[in-house]
Image (cartoon, grey):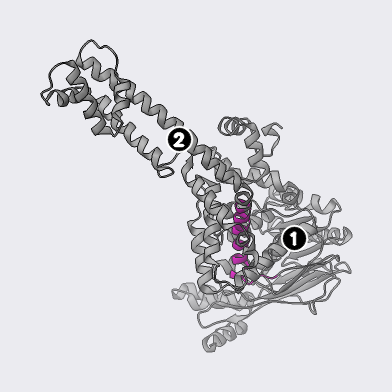
């Protein structure tokens, strides 16, 4: 397969992958979603992630039909990755994509549920030990050795656990085999056999270093031997042999065997002997290193089944524990997949706000044929109205988060959720650009997925912000009608609810209401929509705050003119209520 057939792999990227990894290894890395392999080959992490998402989940990514839907996906994936227990697990989370079928979604949810149950059951000390073990896990240079070491450490960390749960995948491995493999992996390196693997090999290497040192300093050796007061060549030869044997630990016999039968002079004799001796010891080192390496590879081969199992188990455990921690951190719930056209959430929280530490008011909301007590069931479309800064866009984003996470086979930020089949998620945030180009781009983004006849979820925010109000109402009414006609689901945020009447039979209008200002003049909002009720923008609350915050008389007088326009009594009542609000 040509590398350029993969999405995002152009000629330059293909050349780099081929030169660094080879075609076969590059294909294997892409097919196995190995982010690290691509990064080590010189591809940026962001680009590697995008390539792997498309290569391994292209169909799922296609379900994210708009840029805003893809932005929500990236945000939830990034939030989940923050809870990864290893860098490798973070990479694997970043390349998770929406899944192609419900069975795959259920399978992934089963894995997360099992890991979450295990994580909850572990004591505080065991959790800390597991996290410390994963924190020490480093597969940057040798992923196999790191996995074996981590598997052994996890066994120790969970030695006192009553039920190891998902960690059974490492707890049931042959400890003796893993320890032997760990020893072998410790000493087998790309450069050969590491020091400490074999005492004899270490001695030989030490002798070689000493011989090579003498070989580099033949003049000093010559002077040291002569300083002994030797006379004649035979006496010199024997003194030299004993000196070298003493300095290097090489047997005198081997030094004599390395000596040339004849030499031009003493200096030639010394240099020639040391060069031959170094070659001899070097050969002995290489031969013995080959023997030791063969023994180590034999030990590793004998434990290969357990080693491979450890590599798979540690990688999967790191991912599952990371997702379990993510689910626990935000009290996520398993969604219920239903065959009906529905998206319903009970006490849902916006994940992004929760991640930022915001105290989020849970919201219950639904469209379609759902099983919640409220809102009314059967309405395919909801027109959501209400106060500025009332949380309408946040609710749309929350619904998108639920739809995306469920499609990924992950728990959702709600006490409960019903999710029907969704082929395309169309999320469009409010974009305050008032020109024909933006209007055309928006229509090109939101209409084709809807018109294709697939099961589409439409989440559209303030469509009127991109064209004049009269036309916006007509176009928005058309979108609502098209959504109903195509048997899709939709929530449309707008301030033009009155202009959309009459709505199709299976559409309703809901409202979010501001209730006043608190003592700090912050807007008090009930973020829970009221069903089948038009929300009010309540500008008197905003004007009231401006009147109260006015910096000088002229400024205050200007805002009071606005107060008279929106209702002086309402403004004064709001200010009085804010004064006494606890």
In the rendered image of this protein, does residue 3 appear above or below residue 125? above
Is residue 332 shown in magenta? yes
Whether pointer 2 and pointer 1 mark residues with C-beta atoms closer than 8 Å, the reply is no
Q: Residue furthest top?
A: 264
Is residue 563 shown in magenta? no
- Residue that label 1 marks: 107
Task: Please name whichever residue, 559 or 302, is drawn nearer the observer in this view of the structure.
Answer: 302
In the rendered image of this protein, does residue 306 appear above or below residue 547? above
In the rendered image of this protein, does residue 526 appear above or below residue 576? above
Residue 504: x and y, percent? Answer: 87, 66
Residue 478 in the figure: left or right of residue 187: right
Residue 248 in the figure: left or right of residue 327: left
Tag 2 secondary structure: helix
Report the magenta residues as a range: 310-333
Instruction: Tell me if I can see residue 94 in this picture.
Output: no
Residue 3: x and y, percent? Answer: 67, 33
- Residue that label 2 marks: 289
Residue 247: x and y, percent? Answer: 24, 33
Residue 80: x and y, percent? Answer: 60, 60
Q: Quadrant of residue 84?
A: bottom right
Q: Quadrant of residue 220?
A: top left
Principal secondary structure, stretch drawn in magenta: helix
In the rendered image of this protein, does residue 37 appear above or below residue 234? below
Q: Quadrant of residue 536?
A: bottom right
**Other-residue count near label 2 (Cα within 10 Å), few / some / many at <14 / 14–19 / ≥20:** many
Instruction: Tell me if I can see residue 39 in this picture.
Output: yes
Task: Please name whichever residue, 146 or 61, is drawn nearer the observer in this view of the structure.
Answer: 146
Precedes in sequence: disc 2 or disc 1: 1
Q: CA distance from mark 2 to mark 1?
A: 48 Å
Which residue occupies 64% across, 51% down? 95
Task: Please name whichever residue, 560 or 151, is drawn nearer the observer in this view of the structure.
Answer: 151
The quadrant in which the N terminus is found is top right
């Amino acid at each position: 397969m040509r590398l350029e057939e993969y999405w995002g792999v152009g000629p330059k990227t293909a050349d780099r992958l081929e030169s660094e990894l080879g075609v076969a290894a590059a294909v294997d890395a892409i097919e196995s979603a190995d982010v690290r392999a691509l990064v080590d080959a010189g591809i940026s992490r962001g680009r590697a992630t995008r390539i792997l998402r498309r290569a391994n989940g292209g169909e799922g990514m296609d379900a994210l039909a708009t840029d805003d839907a893809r932005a929500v996906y990236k945000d939830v994936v990034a939030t989940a990755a923050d809870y990864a227990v290893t860098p490798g697990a973070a990479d694997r989370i970043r390349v998770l994509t929406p899944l192609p079928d419900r069975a795959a979604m259920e399978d992934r949810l089963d894995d997360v549920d099992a890991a979450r149950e295990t994580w909850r059951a572990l004591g505080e000390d065991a959790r800390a030990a597991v996290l410390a073990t994963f924190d020490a896990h480093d597969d940057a240079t040798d992923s196999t050795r790191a996995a074996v070491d981590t598997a052994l450490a996890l066994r120790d960390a969970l030695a006192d656990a009553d039920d190891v749960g998902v960690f059974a995948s490492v707890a049931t491995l042959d400890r003796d085999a893993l320890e032997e493999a760990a020893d072998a992996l410790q000493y087998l390196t790309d450069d050969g056999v590491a020091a400490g693997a074999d005492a004899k090999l270490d001695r030989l290497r030490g002798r070689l270093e000493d011989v090579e040192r003498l070989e580099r300093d033949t003049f000093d050796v010559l002077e040291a031997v002569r300083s002994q007061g030797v006379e004649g060549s035979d006496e010199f030869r024997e003194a030299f042999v004993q000196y070298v044997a003493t300095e290097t630990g090489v047997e005198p016999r081997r030094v004599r065997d390395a000596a040339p039968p004849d030499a031009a002079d003493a200096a030639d004799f010394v240099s020639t002997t040391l060069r031959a001796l170094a070659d001899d010891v070097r050969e002995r080192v290489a031969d013995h290193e080959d023997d030791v390496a063969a023994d180590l590879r034999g030990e590793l081969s004998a434990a290969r089944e357990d080693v491979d199992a450890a590599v798979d188990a540690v990688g999967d455990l790191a991912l599952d524990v990371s997702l379990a921690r993510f689910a626990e951190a935000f009290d996520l719930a398993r969604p219920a997949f239903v065959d009906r056209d529905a998206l319903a959430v009970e006490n849902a929280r916006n994940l992004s706000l929760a991640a930022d530490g915001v105290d989020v008011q849970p919201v219950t909301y639904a469209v379609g044929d759902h099983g919640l007590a409220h809102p009314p069931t059967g309405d395919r479309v909801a027109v959501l109205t209400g106060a500025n800064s009332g949380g309408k866009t946040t609710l749309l984003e929350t619904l998108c988060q639920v739809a995306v996470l469920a499609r990924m086979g992950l728990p959702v930020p709600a006490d409960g959720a019903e999710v029907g089949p969704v082929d395309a998620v169309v999320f469009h945030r409010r974009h305050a650009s008032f020109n024909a180009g933006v209007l055309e781009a928006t229509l090109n983004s939101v209409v084709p997925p809807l018109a294709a006849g697939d099961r589409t979820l439409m989440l559209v925010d303030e469509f009127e912000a991109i064209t004049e109000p009269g036309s916006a109402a007509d176009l928005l009414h058309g979108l609502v009608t098209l959504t109903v006609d195509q048997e899709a689901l939709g929530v449309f945020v707008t301030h033009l609810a009155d202009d959309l009447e009459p709505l199709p039979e299976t559409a309703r209008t809901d409202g979010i209401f501001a209730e006043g200002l608190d003592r700090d003049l912050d807007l008090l909002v009930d973020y829970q929509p009221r069903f089948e009720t038009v929300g009010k923008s309540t500008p008197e609350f905003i004007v009231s705050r401006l009147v109260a915050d006015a910096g000088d008389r002229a400024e205050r007088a200007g805002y009071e003119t606005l107060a008279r326009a929106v209702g002086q009594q309402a403004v004064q009542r709001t200010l009085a209520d804010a004064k006494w609000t606890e």
